[in-house]
Amino acid sequence: MVTDRALEAPLSYAAQHQSAHLEELFEFLRIPSISAQPQHREDVARAAEWLADSMTAAGLENVRIIETDGHPLVYGDNLKAGPGAPTVLIYGHYDVQPPEPLDLWESPPFEPDVRDDYVYARGSADDKGQLFIHVKAIEAFVRCRNGLPVNVKVLAEGEEEVGGPSLAAFIPEQEELLSADVAVISDTPMLAIGKPAIVYGLRGLAYMLVDVYGPKRDLHSGHYGGAVKNPINALAHIIARLQDEGGKVLIPGFYDDVRTLDEEERKILSELPFDEQAWAEEIGVLGPWGEPDYTLIERIGARPTLDVNGIVGGYTGEGGKTVLPAHAHAKISMRLVPDQNPEEIADAFTRYVTEIAPPEVRVEVQTTGGGSFASISDYNTDAVRAAADAYYEVYGEKPVLMREGGSIPVVGQLQSHLGLETVLMGFSSPDAQIHAPNERFYLPNYYQGIETVIHFLYGYAQRFRAEHVEES
Ligand code: BES
Ligand code: MN
Ligand code: MN
């Protein structure tokens, strides 16, 4: 395909400003905007301000920081595309996961370091790098004579990594501010380097905290062992009864609302060129595990699951200490699929755990409240077609359609509260090590991402206009 002349200017602007765009991303990455850690509250606020300033510099207008009960939202728009142009709502998050464990980082998490075409930093791929791609694509259009081909609204969140409670409350109240023809989100991986993906399904989440209390203080494990129920042993028994060895969750009612995959979708997913061996090697496991009746891709994207995320109790220091602990704690996540309801699942979990808890201990079950619904995006839309064309222009490959196992709570909310179509066009690589030490962003994807979004905004505007001429 021949690049449309109208794209020459913004594409060459992006090409000429690559090093400036990288320097700016580094500034963004240096701010430790860790939403989960209260001691970083000021840093999260600073990241919001930094982003707002850079959005203004990129040519966004009405830029504002919206205070919430938690971390602020950042909003900006540019609505000057003229009559007949569609409006694109771009969402991303500027908060990051905690960097711990720190000793496993080869370079400090908030000092971006480039090695072998990757920039290493917490938040580089998830999601600052991907969010910033959009800011820079907008800038490329604004700096050129013709301006933006679409109206854009940019909404950035500082609480995505903690479940996004403030944004969930904000969305239903802001129908007008957030009205758009489509929402675009870059916060997902590609299938492989050079192989783009549009993710049309994400899992939801219910997150549970379980506390088991036994004696009022730690006891000598010889003097009392065998005569007092051990809270860690009790917790281990509870956990062992949550899931069978094959991955089936044993909570009554857990699968009641699970939507089964139809044959068409199973076919799409089975045709993905996914290398299971390479996948296993990259994460260092002997091989895949999971529900025998489902493929690996289906297990990740289309089946609900349950995982212990952390477990603490007793003595965990050097050497041995003979102690029967007073307390044990576990953090347990359940990834959900359509049409499971996170509140109902949390209730079912609580009922079941309470019921199977040994009577000699006191068990408290709580949800963190950051639950979210799974989401499915329609992939038969002009916006998805425009995104596919844009990837093709830049990568020479049409994107695959796939489901992913992670959660982006806002996607379901944009769909159900605002009736928006959503397109998830990601630019991180599957080996980006998000949430882990040495998170990294593949730099060619940063520049190609900016190009892809430039193509997308232009191509989407054209498709939209063509559609509306037909209609009138
Ligand atoms: N970008 C991820 C979501 C993601 C990860 C999508 C991998 C597809 C593949 C997002 O930032 C994230 O980590 N979300 C959290 C949400 C939770 C804290 C509510 C998640 O999935 O754990
Ligand atoms: Mn993310
Ligand atoms: Mn994340």
Image (spheres, rainbow, N blue to C red):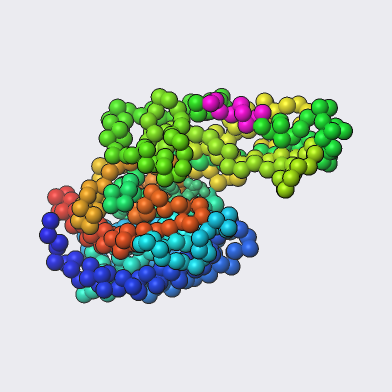
Bounds of the magenta segment: 237-245
- Taking the image as shown, residue 457 lies to the left or right of residue 363, namely left
**In this view of the protein, which residue sits in the foreground, 245 or 183?**
245
Residue most extreme to the front: 319
Residue most extreme to the left: 2
Task: Give me the residue at 55% from left, 40% from top.
Answer: 333
- Taking the image as shown, residue 116 lies to the left or right of residue 463, namely right
Question: Where does the image place residue 258, in percent across and percent down from the top left?
Answer: 44, 29
Total marks placed: 0
Question: Where does the image place residue 387, in percent across and percent down from the top left?
Answer: 26, 52
Q: Is residue 140 above or below residue 36?
A: below
Task: Give me the residue at 84% from left, 33% from top.
Answer: 222
Q: Quadrant of residue 184?
A: bottom left
**In this view of the protein, which residue sits in the foreground, 256 or 111?**
111
Q: Is residue 377 above or below residue 447?
A: above
- Taking the image as shown, residue 268 lies to the left or right of residue 112, namely left
Instruction: Determine if residue 331 is in view.
Output: yes
Confirm whether the magenta stretch covers residue 16.
no
